[in-house]
Image (spheres, helix red, strand yellow):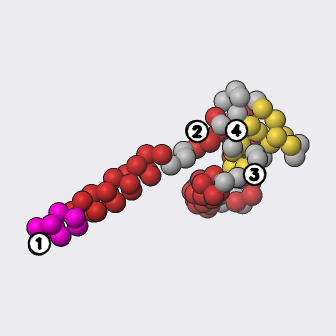
Amino acid sequence: MKNIVSVKKITVLFTIGLLLVAQHAFALDLQTAKQKGLVGESPSGYLEAVTSPSAETNALIKSVNDQRRQKYQEIATRNKTSLQAVEQLAGKKAIEKSNPGSYVKLNGSWQKK
């Protein structure tokens, strides 16, 4: 009886581990989100949703933007300039570097590059 319980516990733990690995493998990444037209670059230096975002897209946007904000602040501090100046420059560069077919926000509206 103890062996059956142990085997069941191991099976359940193994299954949970596989699900966690699979979830990470299928998680939405930035490149895929851009290719699908879910997110685009804006002049603010941050990602924005192009259409009504899913929870997964919102999570991606928040994660990427939080990382960008931290990096922008480091650059602003190092160069003794404002965060806003770094954000604007980063936004301009991100739009310029965006791949053809991706979305960029120009003059307040989304355009396919």
Q: Earlier in the sequence, mark 3 or mark 1?
A: 1
- Mark 2 → mark 1, Cα distance in angstroms: 48 Å
- From the viewer's perspective, is 8 left or right of 82? left
- What amino acid is labelled 4 in the image? Gly
- Mark 2 → mark 4, Cα distance in angstroms: 9 Å
Q: Which mark is residue 20?
A: none
- From the viewer's perspective, is 106 left or right of 28? right
Residue 54 point in image, percent of width and height: 66, 54
As helix, strand or loop, the secondary structure at mark 1 comes to loop
- From the viewer's perspective, is 64 left or right of 81? left
Foreground pick, 79 / 6: 6
Asked if disc 4 and disc 1 are in contact, CB closer than 8 Å, the reply is no
In the picture, which quadrant includes the N terminus? bottom left
Q: Which mark is residue 32?
A: 2
- From the viewer's perspective, is 88 left or right of 16? right
Tell me the residue that label 1 is attached to.
1
- Magenta span of residues: 3-9
Q: Which mark is residue 52?
A: 3
As helix, strand or loop, the secondary structure at mark 3 comes to loop
- What amino acid is labelled 3 in the image? Ser
Tell me the residue that label 4 is attached to.
37
As helix, strand or loop, the secondary structure at mark 2 comes to helix
Q: Residues within 10 Å of mark 1 (few under 14, many from 20)?
A: few
Q: Residues within 10 Å of mark 2 (few under 14, many from 20)?
A: few
Residue 105 point in image, percent of width and height: 80, 42
User: Is 36 situated above or below 23?
Assistant: above
